Amino acid sequence: MTSKALHKKFEEAVAYVNSYKEPLPADLLLKLYAYYKVANRNFGNPGSKTPLINAFKANAMIQAQNISIKQAMKSYVELVDKEIKKS
C-alpha cells in the first residue's frame, strides 16, 4: 500500500471512530489512542483532568513507543476494521 493510500485509509478510520455512536471498550480506546498519537507524532502528556485516565493513556503510549508512524497508521486501520467495523 502506498503512503498516500495508507494516509487516506487512516483518515477514514479516524473519521469513522469519531462518528461512532456506540460505547467502545476501554482497552480498545486506549490502543486507538496510542496508535493515533504515534501516527500524528504527538508525544505530549495526556490531557485528562483525571490522574487515573492519564496513567492508562501514558501506559498505552509506552506500549506503542517503538512502532513507526506507518505501522501505527496501519495498526489503527486494522483495529477499526477488525473490532469496530467487524469486517
Image (cartoon, rainbow, N blue to C red):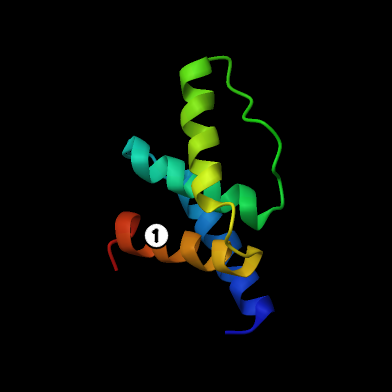
Left or right: 72 as drawn, with respect to 56: right
Specify the quadrant of the image occupied by residue 1.
Answer: bottom right
Q: Give the mark count.
A: 1
Where residue 3 appears, x then y in whole percent?
A: 67, 78
At label 1, the amino acid type is: Leu
Task: Give how far across and how far down residue 4 sits, in percent.
Answer: 68, 77
Task: Identify which residue is drawn at 47% across, 64% down.
Answer: 75
Tag 1: Cα neighbours inside 10 Å, few (<14), some, or many (≥20)? some
The quadrant holding residue 86 is: bottom left
- Label 1 sits on a secondary structure element that is helix
**Left or right of 72 on screen, residue 25:** left
48 and 18: which is toward the camera: 48
**Left or right of 82 on screen, residue 73:** right
- The answer to whether residue 24 is above or below residue 13 is above
Instruction: Out of 73 and 51, give the one closest to the viewer.
Output: 51
> Which residue is depicted at the point 58% across and 51% down?
36
The residue carrying mark 1 is: 79
Screen quadrant of the C terminus: bottom left
Taking depth in this image into account, of 21 and 24 the one nearest to the observer is 24
Q: Who is closer to the viewer here, 9 or 28?
A: 28
- Left or right relative to 24: residue 36: right
* Residue 42: percent from left, percent from top: 71, 45
* In the depicted structure, whether residue 82 falls above or below residue 19: below
Kindly identify the residue that appears in the image at 44 percent across and 41 percent down: 30
Q: Which residue is the extreme one toward the left?
A: 86
Name the residue rendered at 55%, 34% in the picture: 58
The image quadrant that residue 22 belongs to is top left
Q: Is residue 39 above or below residue 2?
A: above
Residue that sits furthest to the bottom in the current view: 1
